[in-house]
Amino acid sequence: MTNSLNLSLTDELRAFIDRNCGDGTLYATPSEFVRDVLRQRKLQLEAAQVRDAILEGYQDAIEGRVVTFEGDLRSLLKKAGK
């Protein structure tokens, strides 16, 4: 489903968008450029969450907050992937 969003931009932001779309760029339209920038930002935020969770896990291990796992890791990962 497609939704529209109207934005008010500063002259500086509009010029930045214009420089990054059209002939000789990766994007044919301003909409394509803005969508890609939003997707990239979303991925950055998701990667930061994963990084923070990994660091939290490392900190737990350093501080001795660990639990011995006696199960089957392959089975567990298969279940999680479904």
Image: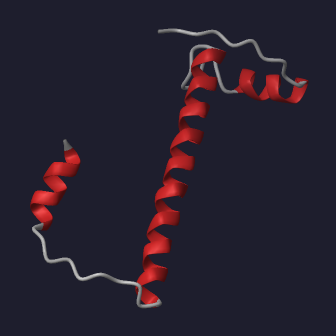
Residue 82 is situated, as x and y percent measured from the top left of the image, at 19, 41
Judging from the image, the colouring scheme is secondary structure
Residue 54: x and y, percent? Answer: 44, 68
Question: What percent of the width, then of the height, locates residue 50?
Answer: 46, 58
> In which image quadrant can residue 14 be found?
top right
Left or right of residue 3: residue 13: right
Q: Residue at x 57, y 48 (%)?
A: 45
Q: Identify the image quadrant of residue 24.
A: top right
Image quadrant where residue 33 sits: top right
Q: How many marks are shown on the rendered structure?
A: 0
Of 5 and 31, which appears nearest the observer? 5
In the image, what residue occupies the spot 49% across and 73% down?
55
Position of residue 47 measured from the top left corner of the image (x, y, whole percent): 49, 53
Q: In this picture, is 7 found above or below 44?
A: above
Q: Is residue 35 visible?
A: yes
Direction right: furthest residue: 11
- Relative horizontal placement of residue 20, taking residue 55 as reference (left or right): right
Above-or-below relation of 36 to 75: above
Side of 18 where 36 appears, left or right? left
Residue 25 visible to an observer of this rendering: no
Is 42 left, or right, of 75 in this rendering? Answer: right
Residue at the spot x=18%, y=56% of the render? 77
Residue at 54%, 33% (x, y): give it: 39
Which sits in the foreground, 78 or 9? Answer: 78
Front residue of 7 and 72: 72
Q: In this view, does 63 lie above or below 8?
A: below
Residue 63, relative to residue 47: is it above or below?
below
